[in-house]
Image (tube, grey):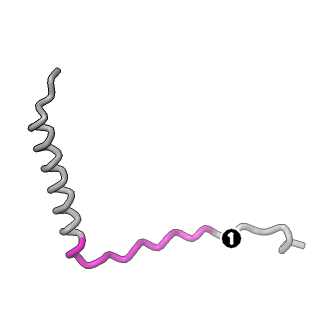
Amino acid sequence: MPVDPYAVLQALLRAEASRAQRADHRSTEPAEPAPTPATEPPTPREDRAR
């Protein structure tokens, strides 16, 4: 099945433009605080039990 190089180029250009637009949009929004990682309960250590 032959591939049209012009169509491939157009698709790549559209994808790059979309990616750049999303990156620009993200940079103008205020930064959201990073979610705090869930803390795991401390595991009992054998030397503390002694």
Residue 2 in magenta stretch:
no
- Residue 8 location, quadrant: top left
Q: Between 34 and 49, which is closer to the camera in this rendering?
A: 34
Q: How crowded is mark 1: few (under 14 residues within 10 Å), some or many (20 or more)?
A: few
Decide if residue 7 is on the left or right side of residue 30.
left
Secondary structure character of the magenta stretch overall = loop
Rendered location of residue 18, percent (x, y): 16, 56
Label 1: which residue? 42
Residue 3 sits above or below residue 29 on the image: above
- Residue 19 location, quadrant: bottom left
Q: Which residue shows up at 40% across the image and 73% down it?
A: 34
Decide if residue 9 is on the left or right side of residue 23.
left
Q: Between 12 and 47, which is closer to the camera in this rendering?
A: 12
Count of marks, rendered view:
1
Q: Which residue shows up at 57% across the image and 71% down it?
A: 39
Q: Which residue shows up at 90% across the image and 73% down it?
A: 50
Rendered location of residue 7, percent (x, y): 10, 37
Locate the N terminus and report the quarter of the image it occupies: top left
Kind of residue indicated by mark 1: Pro
Rendered location of residue 15, percent (x, y): 18, 50
Direction top: furthest residue: 1
Per the rendered image, the range of residues in magenta is: 27-40
Q: Between 21 and 47, which is closer to the camera in this rendering?
A: 21
Direction right: furthest residue: 50
Q: Is mark 1 on a helix, strand or loop?
A: loop
Residue 41 sits above or below residue 13 on the image: below
Q: Which residue shows up at 86% across the image and 71% down it?
A: 47
